[in-house]
Image (tube, rainbow, N blue to C red):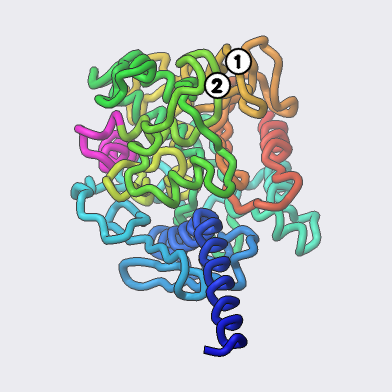
Amino acid sequence: MSRTTKVVISVIVAVTVAVTAIYWYARPLLLTGTGYAAHNACAVDHVAGRQDPDSDLPENPLVPVMRTSTGDAAATASVLGVLAKQTAWALPGYGCTLAGDRPDVLPTATDVTADSNPYASLPLTVGDDADITEALAHGFGDDLDAEAQDALGTRGIVVLKDGELIAERYADGFDESTPQLGWSMTKSVTNLMVGALVQQGELSLDDDQLREEWTDGRQDITIRQLLNMTSGLEWDETYDLGTPITQMLYGEEDMGAYVASQELAHTPGEYLQYSSGSTTLLCDVVTKDRGLANVPRQEIFAPLGLAGATLEADAVGTPVCSSYMWATPREWASIGQFALQDGTWNDQRLLPEGWMTQSTVAIDTEVEEGSDGYALGWWSNTRPDSSVIHDLLPEDTYFASGHDGQRITVVPSQNVVIVRLGFTPAADDNRVDSTSAAILAALN
């Protein structure tokens, strides 16, 4: 073998080793991208019934090399059709699940009809109040140029007053029957599901010793602490290379077990750290012997008549209660109205009396930056020191809040529920607060 050939071979081997090393280093980030894309494509098609999944993808450097395909029962995404391949499987009643093989552990989904929902069959209600119409126009950015309006990305606004649907508006391609992803608004629905189980005597907020493998300080973690994110489990909510949140959503088939494996970073109950892991682990705990991903359907969706709602599951059947509930705008408004009515629906009490009062009192403990106002799965507009967080809104306001500007705004003093849904990854101001303030002013 000539010297030149040896050099060429050495260079090829070195380059191959380097490229392989770079790929394995970057693989967690690549899997985040392909996992997001596969799940998004599957859910937009099979849950929302839309054919434009790319419109729900935030800008990222993988877009030029991403290859995504959607079929009758799954969607697959990869880099250049080969690397970091991920598949999301469409499962009847449960949306889409990322897994290597099609999951077969989910129970038959409880049938949900809209019979018990007073808003489901109403005609489109644009409203006849000029001030409310103007407020909705502000929320949709009618005053903005096309580029800024697209960045604002509002897709639906619904207004309830005294339990009545008084106004709604939708973007092109969306209407009152289009399910939309609530992201972390799902955490607030989890609060309602837990409340229903408490009302039935199935569990208590102060139950501890939640996992058999927890034989250290983690055995003191309670359901309440998972719900209010003071469990103390080590966590990083940053969507970045190798962080727990991206690993949980895009790299773990058993999300609850993954979160449970985290070590304690703080004494339970002493520090509030925003953690999607806490909520998903909570749902692993409370649904494990009660029907897994079917529990939200039987405890919340069916009683409230949320026939268009879906809460997606992981590969072992745990509902992904941190992030993955889809519902129509009116159904999200129904969630807010149910909360406003303190857990009664059609004259039936489904949650303990006073549940929403205790669920919307901000946690009075050390809080990480950006999480002040967090309560039991809901956000309060008032801090423990009585200062108001969102100055444009009444102090008794509370929220379900999700990524990209999803918001259920509940104002008990005015008996109002306002829902804003959209896709707002880039706009500096999603106009949620100012739009709600304008609607409230129009109603007074």
The one nearer the camera, 45 or 57, is: 57
The one nearer the camera, 137 or 187, is: 187
Q: State the mark number for residue 186.
A: none
**Which is nearer the N-term, disc 1 or disc 2?**
2
Seen in the picture, residue 13 relative to 411 is either above or below; the reply is below
The one nearer the camera, 281 or 404, is: 281
Specify the quadrant that holds the C terminus.
top right
Circles 1 and 2 in contact, beta carbons < 8 Å: yes
Q: Check if residue 295 falls in the magenta segment.
A: yes
Instruction: Examine the rendering and report whether any part of residue 440 can be seen.
Output: yes
Per the rendered image, the range of residues in magenta is 285-305
Q: Which residue is mark 2?
A: 272
Seen in the picture, residue 308 relative to 387 is either above or below; the reply is below
User: Which residue is pictured at 37% across the width and 61% down the height?
Assistant: 88
Q: Check if residue 177 falls in the magenta segment.
A: no
User: Which residue is pictured at 30% across the width and 19% down the height?
Assistant: 215
Badge 2, how many Cα within 10 Å: few under 14, some, many 20+?
many
Helix or strand or loop: what does disc 1 sit on?
strand
Seen in the picture, residue 342 relative to 127 is either above or below; the reply is above
Instruction: Give the overall secondary structure of the magenta segment.
Output: helix
In the image: residue 190, left or right of residue 411: left
Residue type at mark 1?
Answer: Glu
Give the percent coordinates (x, y) of residue 143: 80, 54
Helix or strand or loop: what does disc 2 sit on?
strand
Give the percent coordinates (x, y) of residue 160: 54, 37
Give the percent coordinates (x, y) of residue 433: 69, 36
Residue type at mark 2?
Answer: Leu
Q: Which residue is mark 1?
A: 366
